[in-house]
Image: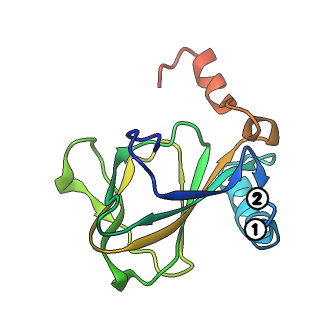
Amino acid sequence: PDAADGRPRFAVELAERGAYRQELAHTLRPFVEDALLPYIRRKYRCPQAALCSAVFRRFMPEERREVPPHREYGALAVCTVGLQEPSAVTGGMFVQDHGRATSDRAFLHLGRGDVCVHGWDLLQGTEVREGSRLELKLFFKDSAEAAASALCPWYDADAEAGSAN
C-alpha cells in the first residue's frame, strides 16, 4: 500500500533500505552514485547522504490515477525522474501550498530524463487526468545507517531545540 493514503501503488521496488535489487544494480547504481548523490549531498549539505529506496511507479487508466498531496516525512530528499514525454499525460506530479486547495496546484511537466529534487517538506502529489504516467522515485536519507533503518535523524536538531515542526 501507498504510505500517503494506504491504497494500492502499482509500483515495483528497485532498491530498499539502501540495497539495490541485484538485477538492476548495474544500471541504477551509476545513475544514483555518479549523478544524483553528489548533487543531493551539496544541495542539502549532507556529505553522508545515501539512497534509501527507489520505486518505479505507474499511473494507468483503470488503475490508480492520483496520490493525494503529502509530504515525504521518511526521506531527507526525494528525486522524481520523468520517464516519458509530457505530451503522454495530462496532469502528473504537482506541488501546492495548502493540503485541500486544488486550485493552487502547479503541475511539473517532467520530460524523459528530467529530474525534480525536493526536500521532505514539499507538499506534492500526483494527479493523472488523461493518459498514463511512468516515473522513477528515489528517496534519500542523511546516512547509510538511516537508510538501512526507519530512523530520520535530521529531525533531531529541531526536536532538541523544541520545534514541533
State the residue lying farthest toward the front.
62
Q: Report the disc number at residue 128.
A: none
Few, some or many C-alpha atoms within 10 Å of disc 1 (few <14, some 14-19, many ≥20)? few
Horizontal and vertical percent position of residue 72:
50, 42
Name the kind of residue labelled 1 in the image: Leu
Left or right of 93, for residue 41: right
Q: Are marks 2 and 1 in contact (CB under 8 Å)?
A: yes
- 44 relative to 21, above or below: above
Q: How is the image coloured?
A: rainbow
Horizontal and vertical percent position of residue 106:
29, 62
Q: Secondary structure at mark 2?
A: loop
Q: For this rendering, which residue is in front, 58 or 159?
A: 58
Q: Secondary structure at mark 1?
A: loop
Quadrant of the image occupied by residue 38:
bottom right
Horizontal and vertical percent position of residue 123:
39, 46
Quadrant of the image occupied by residue 155:
top right
Horizontal and vertical percent position of residue 57:
50, 62
Left or right of 163, for residue 23: right
Q: Residue at x 38, y 74 (%)?
A: 109
Q: For this rendering, which residue is in front, 77 or 130?
A: 130
Residue pointed to by mark 2: 21
- 34 relative to 47, above or below: below
Count the labels in the image: 2
Few, some or many C-alpha atoms within 10 Å of disc 2 (few <14, some 14-19, many ≥20)? some
Q: Residue at x 48, y 19 (%)?
A: 164
Q: For this rendering, which residue is in front, 164 or 146?
A: 146
Q: For this rendering, which residue is in front, 58 or 97?
A: 58
Quadrant of the image occupied by residue 110:
bottom left
Q: Report the disc number at residue 24.
A: 1
Cα distance in 3D space between marks 2 and 1: 6 Å
Name the kind of residue labelled 2 in the image: Arg
Q: Residue at x 32, y 56 (%)?
A: 66
